[in-house]
Amino acid sequence: DESHLEEIMDSLHQKWHHIHRKEALCESFPHLKETMGQKLNDNYRLLISTLVFEPVWYLEQYYDNILQYTGNNTLIVAHLSILANYTEGEIKKLVEHHPRLVVNCHRYFTHAYHGSLAHAHLRNIEWIAGLQIKFEYFMLLASNSW
């Protein structure tokens, strides 16, 4: 029934706005306020924005693959979905293993088909720009696209 679907979408939209207002979510990973020790340039040719929610073992392989097919002039920024349960230790280890990966310290609700994915990508780009890191091009990449 179409009206029931509209009610569900309205409910999801309201929940998204409620979670979205809680932007100061860096408290869940205090070390994410910094770039976690990554030695960054102030200028990159390509910025790859990634949105992730999968288990850490998957992310290890995912970022290995991206790094293998990109050069030193590419920076990768990750958004960790607020719905995923990562530990601080897991994320620190992930970043240590991937020298051109930084993790956006803000975590937002993400769900398909209502704009939150675009929002998280734009926030990744905004966060990098706020660190005074320049780039010529950006690419939006989903962790579950094959």
Image (cartoon, grey):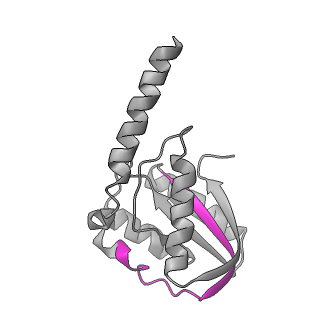
Image-based side of 57 in relation to 44, left or right: left
In this view, the residue in front, 113 or 78, is 113
Q: Residue furthest top?
A: 1
In this view, the residue in front, 53 or 42, is 42
Residue 54 belongs to the span the image colors magenta: no
Q: Is residue 71 visible?
A: yes
Identify which residue is drawn at 64% across, 56% down: 141
Q: Quadrant of residue 88?
A: bottom left
- Magenta segment: 32-52
Residue 40 belongs to the span the image colors magenta: yes
- In the rendered picture of this protein, how many numbered marks are placed on residues? 0
Q: Is residue 98 visible?
A: no
Image-based side of 79 in relation to 85, left or right: right
Tell me residue 18's x, y (percent). 33, 46
Tell me residue 21's x, y (percent). 34, 54
Identify which residue is drawn at 51% across, 56% down: 120
Identify which residue is drawn at 51% across, 53% down: 52
Tell me residue 113's x, y (percent). 57, 37
Image-based side of 110 in relation to 22, left or right: right
Identify which residue is drawn at 39% across, 49% down: 84
Q: Quadrant of residue 28?
A: bottom left
- On screen, residue 73 above or below 20: below
- On screen, residue 53 above or below 126: above
Tell me residue 85's x, y (percent). 34, 51
